[in-house]
Image: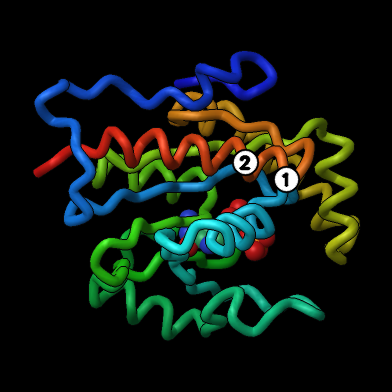
Amino acid sequence: MEASAHQDVAGAHRAPAVPEDQLGGDPSSPLIFIVSGPGGVGKGTIVKVLVERDPVLWLSRSWTTRDQRPGEADDSYVFTSRDAFEHRIERGGFLEWTDFLGNYYGTPTPDPLPGRDTVLEIEVDGARQVKALHPDAVLIFVLPPSRDEQARRLRGRGDPEQKVDQRVRKAEEEEPIGRALADHIVVNDDLGRTVDEMLGIIESHRSRRIVR
Ligand code: 5GP
């Protein structure tokens, strides 16, 4: 695991060691970048800007059984019923899925265009499942600058107070698991700086892509 820009800027951009003879830039070996972190940390905004700035990235759209929030874009998820979700589980149609605070969330089996690298924006249980299936997947774990700031962001997107409390408590459970699993930890103190740091991490892994 590597530290955030605050602790070690150079370290945050350093990819894990790969044997020299396996280094290369073969676009036929696509990478998977997992952006994970507690709710309210800004993952959704971060991945939106990442894919705008890096056209090679392909953002997977998740399925969820939770209700669409007022003002939330129709394409932020495939909003679906529990029956339809469970039917897809039975058909083996998810790379990973989980029950997060009473709703299902899942990543449909990814199907990116050739040459594109996949980005998943998911919570830690899903991140653990993807790392188990794809040990080469790169997990970037995003943290809020503080718990107060995280609660402020959750309130700002319209979550009721009871949900804010529930999600802050959940974040306390998720954080140590995410830290242990992470390849990189990034503190989202400023959107532009955070995205720049993450683009640097992504480039460092591309330049060390393992040729299969
Ligand atoms: P929200 O309800 O705030 O949109 O999402 C709740 C949590 O579920 C967030 O941490 C979000 O990153 C995560 N999430 C979104 N899509 C998926 C998914 O496909 N799989 C998993 N495991 N988590 C997801």
Q: What residue type is labelled 2?
A: Asp
Quadrant of the rendered image containing residue 101: bottom right
- Would residue 133 be found to the left or right of residue 156 on screen? left
**What numbered label is drawn on residue 128?**
none
- Would residue 167 be found to the left or right of residue 50 on screen? right
Instruction: Determine if residue 37 is in view.
Output: yes
Q: Residue at x 71, y 38 (%)?
A: 193
State yes or no: discs 1 and 2 in contact (Cβ < 8 Å).
Answer: yes
Quadrant of the rendered image containing residue 68: bottom right
As drawn, 82 above or below 23: below
Horizontal and vertical percent position of residue 44:
64, 59
SS type, badge 2: helix
Q: Residue at x 60, y 19 (%)?
A: 9
C-alpha span from label 1 to label 2: 6 Å
Q: Residue at x 89, y 56 (%)?
A: 155
Quadrant of the frame with the N terminus: top left
Q: Which of 103 and 204 is in front in this view?
A: 204
SS type, badge 1: helix
Quadrant of the rendered image containing residue 65: bottom right
**What numbered label is drawn on residue 192?**
1
Horizontal and vertical percent position of residue 128:
39, 41
**What numbered label is drawn on residue 196?**
2
Q: Nearer the viewer, residue 198 or 166?
A: 198
Q: Local crowd at mark 2 within 10 Å, few (<14), some, or many (≥20)?
A: few
Q: Which of 81 and 150 is in front in this view?
A: 150
Q: Which amino acid does label 1 sit on?
A: Gly
Q: Nearer the viewer, residue 200 or 74?
A: 200
Horizontal and vertical percent position of residue 187:
69, 32
Q: Is mark 2 within 8 Å of ligand 1?
A: no
Q: Residue at x 51, y 36 (%)?
A: 200
Tell me the quadrant of ligand 1: bottom right
Total label count?
A: 2
